[in-house]
Image (cartoon, coloured by chain):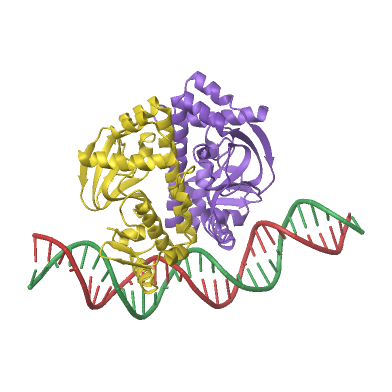
Chain colours: A yellow, B purple, C green, D red
Amino acid sequence: MIEARTGLSLWLDRLLLRSPLSEEECGQLLALPGTVERIRANRDFVRLGEEVTTCCLILSGMAGRFGQARNGERLTTAIHIAGDMADLHSAVLPTAASALQSLGEALIYRVPHAAIMDLAERYPAIAQAFWRDCTVDSAVLSQWALTNARQPAMERIAHLFAELGTRFDIGEKRDGANFEFPLTQVQLGDATNLTAVHVNRMLRALRENGVADVRSKRVRILDWKKLCAVADFDDTYLHLHRPHDG
Amino acid sequence: MIEARTGLSLWLDRLLLRSPLSEEECGQLLALPGTVERIRANRDFVRLGEEVTTCCLILSGMAGRFGQARNGERLTTAIHIAGDMADLHSAVLPTAASALQSLGEALIYRVPHAAIMDLAERYPAIAQAFWRDCTVDSAVLSQWALTNARQPAMERIAHLFAELGTRFDIGEKRDGANFEFPLTQVQLGDATNLTAVHVNRMLRALRENGVADVRSKRVRILDWKKLCAVADFDDTYLHLHRPHDG
DNA sequence: CGCGGTATTGACCAGTCTCAATCACGGTGG
DNA sequence: CCACCGTGATTGAGACTGGTCAATACCGCG
């Protein structure tokens, strides 16, 4: 279970960025029980409307959260990377309003709601940290909605890359300017509300303008400044910087 | 302060739909301190990026939550009615990521974060209720994003009316098929991601098809069945029905 | 080596936006 | 009591972003 431990600690690091927790509380969080599960590429591992009893921590790979219209069209509303508790919200709202799909192959750690809620009940600071984390998620979603609604196609795609790059840059040795990106162009379209055809055209434009090169499941950001300018990107909404220190 | 008491009790009713709370806990919630404030029509009363120290309970009127792109364009991400704690999330994330604007004239009750967090710390069940409520808000936002992204103009507008009608129908004598709606067509466009011109054309179409009549700050739903069909509306995402009773 | 899924490109189409003119209505001052 | 004014509503004509349809190329894998 070394994998799970690493994932929990990644997650804890992120919680600590936003909420102060005592030694004891950290220990309790790192000791959360669960089971590791390997998810094959592009599989739904939480289905829409399902009654869920666990939260899913991403250990490796990526996962998309998405909603679905009655005609079956999907819209990805969040992309989760290793160290994200993808559906912490399900602990208080177990009927999945949005589903989860692996993007490429992924490894997850399923933590029972019971264990999560038990900690929340016994440690007010942990409850607050959970609440806050869900709130940040919601802020990210709100930005996502704004970008998808108000920006043209290229800006939307650029924004997604800028967001992911920034998140990869935090707290790890991963390179925010060159990261694995296992989404197909269709999936990228689901996230940016575009057709695969148009995604393709925009990726070409981004490459030709020397902004970013997306190829063979990998994003290479060529010019971070240009990317942020194109994307109208400002990372404050991600709340990845401690409010009261350096 | 009779007004404030009524608003708090409306809010409590909604909390109780989703979370069980003891007599004592209900009493504590109803006793939350705060100050009543009258907001003139179409005024921002929480500005973007501002450090907030209170949560705003809507006592009467309507308020819009919105995000803003750097070019100043707004996107309304939620519409709040009387009895909604519009920015409960600000209690754990005081830097306003989205602003609040009165839609028409409104009356609000500002509750200090300190009082909210104090209750959350002393009563785990209250903390959980708050967390759950923010999560429902997030689910609503997610549906909003899906609708705005994937549905054509008329469906989006219809969906908004269906959602509001449903929310008005709960727990009060207000009529969900005929309610005050003080938004201008520009503001309605901000919420549905359309221009005022196109909103106007779609409202006409809704009227001509006998679905809904929107005129002089009032929505009249002519045919609820048709409206839901047009809107592809399903109210489960609002979580307005108690999970375990009738 | 062939197959299935993915990527790429082109030609054309459609929903929504933009620009612009006109209308309706509530409030104000004379 | 009425002319005036400003905001919001309504309507038309034309432009543009992104979607649809369709053909072809690529690539990993059995």
Instruction: Judge from the rendering whether residue B98 lies leftward or rightward of residue A214; answer left or right.
Output: right
Direction from residue A93 to residue A184 in the image, left or right = left
Q: Residue furthest top?
A: B24
Give the quarter of the image for residue A95: top left
Residue B207 in sight in this render: no
Percent x, y for residue A82?
30, 47
Front one among B160 and A139: A139
- Residue toward you, A243 or B95: A243
- Whether residue A59 is visible, yes or no, is yes
B23 above or below B215? above
Residue B18: image quadrant is: top left
Residue A61 image point, x, y percent:
26, 51
Image-based side of A125 in relation to A37, left or right? right
- Classify residue B19 by image quadrant: top left
Identify the image quadrant of the N terminus of chain A: top left
| Depicted A37 relative to depicted C20: above or below | above
